[in-house]
């Protein structure tokens, strides 16, 4: 359960936070064309849009367990006109992917919300 909730106010807070995070942490991140990127816990898509925009030749698979957040993420990416993102409702502890299915993994502001973060990284 996400401690901050899933409402509109939280969505706006995450969007504002994303602008700072992008500038400070990963604004220059570019994934090579043809690469597959897994975004763990995409939430409302604030980071997803930036990743997709900066790496138009990469295929980004973004997932979250919260359907309300996923709906906002899908809307945000569609509004931005980005087509290199696939969204998925999934459980971090039981991912539906084969081993080595991705070239890169992006995770931001997720582990601190988990009761078993080490297990999630396995």
Image (spheres, rainbow, N blue to C red):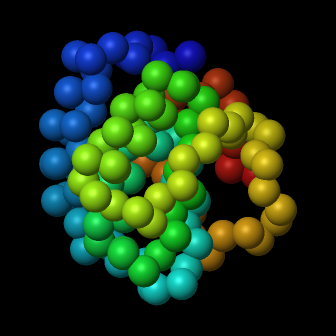
Residue 60 locus on image (x, y percent): 51, 63
Q: Quadrant of residue 49?
A: bottom left
Q: Is residue 86 above or below residue 90?
A: below
Residue 91 locus on image (x, y percent): 70, 35
* Residue farthest along the bottom direction in this orientation: 33
The count of marks equals 0
Residue 58 vs residue 55: left or right?
right
The residue lying at 16 percent from left, 48 percent from top is 20
Residue 108 locus on image (x, y percent): 43, 48
Q: Is residue 5 above or below residue 34?
A: above
Q: Quadrant of residue 14?
A: top left
Q: Is residue 17 above or below residue 7?
A: below
* Residue farthest along the right direction in this orientation: 98
- Can residue 58 be seen at all in this image of the molecule? yes
- Can residue 111 be seen at all in this image of the molecule? no
The residue lying at 26 percent from left, 47 percent from top is 79
Residue 119 vs residue 36: left or right?
right
Q: Is residue 105 above or below residue 66?
A: below
The residue lying at 45 percent from left, 85 percent from top is 32
The residue lying at 28 percent from left, 26 percent from top is 11
Residue 86 locus on image (x, y percent): 54, 55
């Amino acid at each position: 359960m996400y401690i901050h909730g899933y409402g509109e106010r939280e969505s706006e807070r995450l969007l504002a936070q994303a602008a700072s995070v992008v500038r400070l942490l990963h604004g220059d991140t570019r994934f090579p064309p043809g690469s597959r990127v897994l975004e763990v816990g995409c939430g409302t898509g604030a980071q997803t849009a930036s990743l997709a925009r900066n790496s138009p030749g990469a295929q980004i698979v973004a997932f979250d367990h919260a359907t309300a957040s996923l709906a906002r993420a899908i809307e945000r990416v569609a509004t931005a006109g980005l087509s290199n993102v696939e969204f998925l409702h999934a459980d971090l502890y039981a991912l539906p992917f084969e081993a080595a299915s991705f070239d890169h993994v992006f995770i931001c502001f997720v582990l601190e919300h988990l009761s078993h973060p080490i297990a999630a990284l396995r």
